[in-house]
Image (cartoon, rainbow, N blue to C red):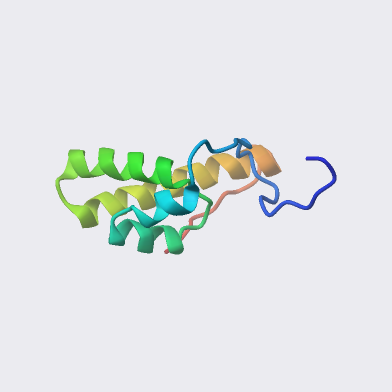
Amino acid sequence: MSGRASNRGASALKLRRSSTDPMRDYDRLPRELRAWLAQAARPWSPLSARRAFARALAATGDRMQALAELDRIEVQKIRRDAATVWGASYPAGTIVR
């Protein structure tokens, strides 16, 4: 980044520019997905959250199970990020919600 502070911290997340309005996209999400995103441990774009939720909902047929699948995906991504940020020998531990 060009000397500006970033709120991304130490993360393996790629920096991308959005071609849409993320706030408008967030406002269009289902209520339960917006609530889930509000307490998510890592930053999700509205688009990626909607895609993951739609896949999980199609697989489970149940909104609560779909949100539980998002929890599982998030833990998996945090473990991957921990290995990238702190090294493969860092104990990722268990994330409890």
Q: Where is residue 96 in the image (x, y as percent from the top left)?
A: 44, 62
Quadrant of the rendering where the N terminus is positioned? top right
- Where's residue 65, x and y in %? 23, 52
Q: What's the residue at 39%, 46% (across, down)?
A: 49
Quarter holding the C terminus?
A: bottom left
> How many numbered circles are shown?
0
Q: In this view, does 63 lie to the left or right of 86?
A: left
Say above or below: 66 vs 16: below
Taking 46 as reference, is 60 left or right? left
Q: Residue furthest left?
A: 61
Residue 56 in the image: state x and y as whole percent: 26, 42
Q: Where does residue 9 sit, x and y in percent of width and height?
A: 70, 51
Q: Nearer the viewer, residue 28 or 11?
A: 28
Residue 80 picture quarter: top right
* Residue furthest to the right: 3
Q: In this view, does 89 lie to the left or right of 34?
A: right
Q: In this view, does 59 lie above or below 23?
A: above
Identified at 48% across, 48% down, the residue is 22
Residue at the (38%, 57%) spot, across then down? 27
Give the residue displayed 16% in from the left and 51% down from the top. Answer: 62
Between 80 and 93, the one nearer to me in the picture? 80
Decide which of 74, 7 is in the foreground and name it: 7
